[in-house]
Every structure is written in structure tokens, then in C-alpha cells.
Amino acid sequence: MVNLSTIYSNVTQGPILDNTTEIVRVTVLILIVLSFTVFYHWLAMIFHVYLTSPHLQEMARCVLFIHMLVNDTLYLLISFFMFVSSVYLLYMPVPVCYALSTITTSSFRVTPYNLAIMSIERYTAICYPLRHGETCNVRWCNYMIVLMWVLGLVPNAVDFIAMNFSVSRDFYSLNMICNWLSFSKNQVQSTIRSLVLILSFSMVGLIIGYTYIKVMMVALKISSSKSSAFKAGKTVLLHAFQLFLCMTSFSSTFTEIYVRNNYAFVPSVNFFFFMCLPRFISPLIYGLRDNVFRKHTQNICTPICLKGP
């Protein structure tokens, strides 16, 4: 996750910090906390619906959606902790920092993988409806979740091996301000990280594009805008939009290159808008659009609204 490491490494460097920078940073922290409040309130409702509705626990798309929420929650919590620790110069043991960095980078990669699997599930439901129930079941979802995390963790294992060729034994006994860039010790690691990100997002983009085309071909044959195929096509298109939100994190690199020399608060703003905000918005949009979860959450919210203050 090159972009996140850039933010962490730059957040305490560059122009001399002034009052404006500190005000912006505090404002960003407040915005993140407020966003967390809304996000976790929504998360609590979704989990309540899921855990109290056994039939939802048997639906593949619901299982994958819940996994996406858990993954985004894990990513947001640890990333926010690492961001705050880097801003306020909190030192921690190298093994702890590396473990946290491994979780965030793996989680970052798992998100697009999850979107690809969700698109495949919709593709199977529309193009092979008779095989959907047999193929895309809970066991299949569990296998896919394990596969996602294996694909997410393997690059970190390779990175760890490559790093150990360039560090001494006492490196792991040190304390450091936690940022992923501190573990980049040679060119091999940088090459591996770049290739993994390029291949991951390219592969996911191709899968989403392919499934969207196939689903829309079925929808055009049916020639009904209210058909399940058209709805599935919109869902796959939503996954493409979610993938785009994930990829916006890379744009912060360019803003920092051309702007941060004049404005020290740029990394803090980037962290909120490019790293956190897409994770807050994406599950919210998907949950509101999904008929099953929208209906159940409305049933939860309606009595609360009727009671009033």
C-alpha cells in the first residue's frame, strides 16, 4: 500500500508546522470521529439484521457483504490508530508496527478481491441460475474468503523475506514511529509492492468488466428494465464504482508531490478524503441499495423515528 505509507512517512516531515496545520489536523480528526460514529451506527444495524435473520446467513451475497464490512472496519480502525500515532510521534516496537502494517496492507488488497467475488456471485445468479444455489453457497463463500486473505497475505510474506536480507538482527528490538515505508529496505520490496497492486486492481477490473458485460447481455435478451438481470447489472456497476473509490487512494500521491511543500496539512487531508471516506461511503451505498438490508433497516428505524425524542 504505497500511498498509505507515503502519508505516514510525510505526516511529520516537510514544512514547519504552524497553527493552520494543527487546526486542519484537529479538524480532520474530528471529521474522522464523526464519520466513524455514523459508520458504526450503520454497521450495528446491519449486523443486527444479519444475526437475527437466519435466512440472510444462507445468502452468498449477504455473507460477502458482511465480510466486506468487517474488512473495512478492521482497515479503518488500524489505519486510524497508525495515523494518529504517526501524527503525535508515538513510538512502538518494530514487531508490533509490522504486524499492524501487515493487517492494513492485506486488508487494503482484500477489498477489491471481495468486490470481484461479489460480482462473480451476481454473474452466476443471472447467467447460471440453476447452478447458483449449488455453487454459490455458504461453504463457497467461506472458501472464497480464505482465498482472499491468502492472496492478501502472501505478498506480505514475500516482502518480509526480502526485507530480512537487508536488516540486522537487532532491527526487531527497536522502537519506531509506525509507518509502512520504514520497512522498505531494498528495491525488490518496492517492485513487489508495485506489481502486486497493479496486478490486483487490473485483475479485479477485468473480472468486474467481464461479469457486467455478460449480465447486461442477458438483461438485453430479457428486454425488461425491471428484470433481475438489469438489477444485477446495476449491482456489478456499483462494484466498479466501489473499486474506483478504492483506487482514489493513489491520487493522494500526486497531490502531495505538487502541494505538500507549501502546505504541511495535505497528508492529513489526504488521509481523510482518499483513505477513510471511500471506506465510509462504499458500504453505506451498497447497504442502502440492497433491497433485503434496506427493508430490514427501515423496520428497525421506523419505530425509533415514531417514538421521537
Image: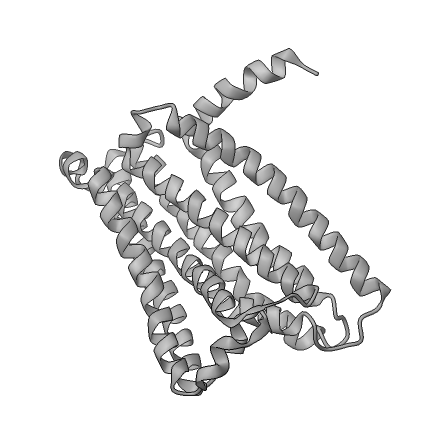
In the visual, does 216 lie left or right of 6? left
249 is higher (above) or lower (below) than 287: below
Q: Residue at x 34, y 59 (%)?
A: 204
Q: Residue at x 42, y 32 (%)?
A: 290
Name the image quarter holding the C terminus: top right
User: In terms of depth relative to the viewer, which is nearer, 11 or 201?
Assistant: 11
Q: Quadrant of residue 90?
A: bottom right
User: In terms of depth relative to the viewer, which is nearer, 75 or 127?
Assistant: 75
Q: Residue at x 45, y 27 (%)?
A: 48
In the visual, does 68 lie left or right of 270? left
45 is higher (above) or lower (below) than 192: above
Tell me, yes or no, if residue 238 can be seen here.
no
Outermost residue on the right side: it is 19
159 is higher (above) or lower (below) than 51: below
User: In terms of depth relative to the viewer, which is nearer, 293 or 1?
Assistant: 1
Q: Quadrant of residue 305?
A: top right
Q: Position of residue 281 (x, y in %)?
A: 54, 45
Tell me, yes or no, if residue 295 can be seen here.
yes
Outermost residue on the top side: it is 307
